[in-house]
Amino acid sequence: MVIAGYLLDLDGTVYLGERLIPGVDRAIAELRARGRRIVFLSNKPLQSRTDYAEKLTRLGIPTTEDEVINSSYVLARYLGKRAPGATVYAIGEPPLIAELEAAGFAISEDPKKIEYVIAAFDRTFDYHKLNIAFQALRRGAHFVATNPDRTCPVDGGEIPDAAGVIAALEATTGRKVEEIVGKPSRHTVAVALERLGLPAEECAMVGDRLETDVVMGKQAGLTAILTLTGVTTPDAVSEAPVPPDYVIESVAALPELDARLQG
């Protein structure tokens, strides 16, 4: 096995909130010095790729926008191939809206015009947004979402994520979401591998969630590495229906594992 590239989750893996997980900056610097290609992944559509790159750089990990892939970007690419220029309504925050507008989509709150309803992580979700989406879906709009996460890890705990928005729309409309493009979707891993320029068998997915990071890695043929700095406990690993290939305490330990994987 030779691992030439890493797909690194962010929240709960590289940092928690505004706090870098200790030793991660040095570990990534070492991996880069060994020539490993790295791309950062986030299911969270609350910031732009530029925002993520600037945050990583500020935390001591120099990063460019091209090294970051988030669910907003994957969604814009997904819709761009299937319905370029479509009229959409997103339950989401300004960075997601900006990504969609930059990709050429029309944003509307008129249920008669909306062709796609997008459910996302939205800390401003309210009844007004729910009703617009409800009315559009009842009129036959397509139903897609950025990510399936139930919660988002933050420094000191967790907060509700996009799964709550998806559940609200499914419960009220009787519709099921048609496509979720974030991890563990094939759409995210395809964009990441394209960016790395490497085949799946030469890459590893590193993250803190069994149901997204590990599942995506295993389904796509990557080496799946779980880190215990986020939401997953050691007890949960032993009960996982899709277990990781490796478990590490932190990404700080990744260079040591990387050396072992180059056999």
Image: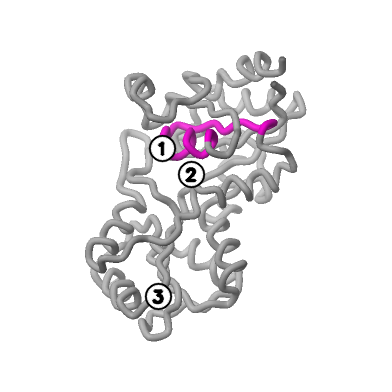
Viewer-side residue, 71 vs 1: 1
Q: Main secondary structure of the magenta part?
A: helix
* Residue 73 placement (x, y as % from top left): 57, 57
Rendered residue at 58%/53% (across/down): 49
> Which of the two labelled residues, at mark 3 and mark 1, occupies the earlier sequence position?
3
Q: Helix, strand, or loop for circle 1?
A: helix
Spatial CA span between label 2 and label 3: 24 Å
Residue extending farthest to the bottom is: 112
- Mark 3 is surrounded, within 10 Å at the Cα level, by few (under 14), some (14 to 19) or many (20 or more) other residues, namely many
- Mark 1 is surrounded, within 10 Å at the Cα level, by few (under 14), some (14 to 19) or many (20 or more) other residues, namely some
The reply to whether the magenta stretch includes residue 163 is no
Please state the extent of the stretch shown in magenta in the rendering.
201-218
Rendered residue at 59%/41% (across/down): 40
> Which of the two labelled residues, at mark 2 and mark 1, occupies the earlier sequence position?
2
Vertical order, 251 against 207 (above or below): above
Spatial CA span between label 2 and label 1: 7 Å
Q: Image quadrant for the C terminus?
A: top right
> Which of the two labelled residues, at mark 2 and mark 3, occupies the earlier sequence position?
3
Q: Tell me the number on the disc at residue 141.
A: 3
Residue labelled with disc 1:
211
Viewer-side residue, 166 vs 18: 166
Q: Helix, strand, or loop for circle 3?
A: loop
Mark 1: amino acid? Glu
Residue labelled with disc 2:
184
Spatial CA span between label 3 and label 1: 28 Å
Q: For the residues labelled 2 and 1, say whether their Cβ atoms are less than 8 Å apart.
A: yes
The reply to whether the magenta stretch includes residue 217 is yes
Q: Image quadrant for the N terminus?
A: top right
Mark 2: amino acid? Pro
